[in-house]
Amino acid sequence: MEIRLCKDTEISKLAEIWYEASLNAHDFVDKDFWGSQKNNMKEKYLPMAETYVISNEKDVIGFISMVDHYLAALFIDVKQQGAGYGSRLLHFIKGRREKIQLKVYKKNTNAVNFYSKNGFVIKEELLDEQTAEEELLMEWKKI
């Protein structure tokens, strides 16, 4: 298992992982929304972020994207979820930051529980204007 910076040639693969995982984790959001965001993810958001991938000998399993101290994305291939890859990526990035903030949909209880278990606390409840869904601003600080 390796964690390393993303290569430009992997952006399309990461966008696919993001799309499939988003559909899986956010069934309360219209699936057409995720499709409408796929090109933005590939052409705008991933290239502007500091993105690390976790991979095995043959393929990328997931990724984490940071913009300064903001965790913009943490997604694992849906076939590989639950095996600890997300925890490994989060632990990796926590070793490189003093503070991390993120937003997560309130209805995505698996993600809320995952981040809570990993030391994040809810700072604020917000409304995502694009989806009209409640989201939580969560934060972790190095002790």
Image (tube, rainbow, N blue to C red):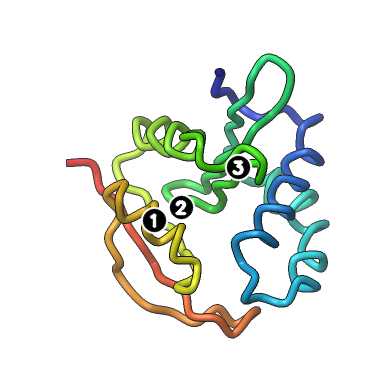
The residue tagged 1 is 101
Picture residue at 78% right of the left edge, 49% below the top: 42
Which amino acid, by three-letter code, is at mark 3?
Ile
Residue 105 on image: x %, y %: 50, 70
Picture residue at 42% right of the left edge, 30% below the top: 92
Q: CA distance from mark 3 to mark 2?
A: 18 Å
The residue tagged 3 is 76
Query: Dot 1: few (<14), some (14–19), or many (≥20) neighbours within 10 Å?
Result: some
| Marked residue nearer the N-terminal end (3 or 2) | 2
Q: Are marks 3 and 2 in contact (CB under 8 Å)?
A: no
Which amino acid, by three-letter code, is at mark 1?
Gln
Of residues 43 and 61, which is closer to you in this image? 61
Residue 137 on image: x %, y %: 39, 67
Which residue of the protein is positioned furthest toward the top in this rendering? 57
Q: CA distance from mark 2 to mark 1?
A: 5 Å
The residue tagged 2 is 70
Query: Dot 2: few (<14), some (14–19), or many (≥20) neighbours within 10 Å?
Result: some
Which amino acid, by three-letter code, is at mark 2?
Tyr
Q: Nearer the viewer, mark 3 or mark 2?
A: 3
Q: CA distance from mark 1 to mark 3?
A: 19 Å
Picture residue at 60% right of the left edge, 61% below the top: 25
Image side of residue 106 versus residue 17, left or right: left
| Helix, strand or loop status at disc 2 | strand
Reply above or below: 55 against 89.
Answer: above
Q: Are marks 2 and 1 in contact (CB under 8 Å)?
A: yes
Q: Quadrant of the N terminus?
A: top right
Which quadrant of the structure image shows residue 116?
Answer: bottom left
Q: Quadrant of the C terminus?
A: top left
Residue 62 on image: x %, y %: 62, 37
| Helix, strand or loop status at disc 1 | strand
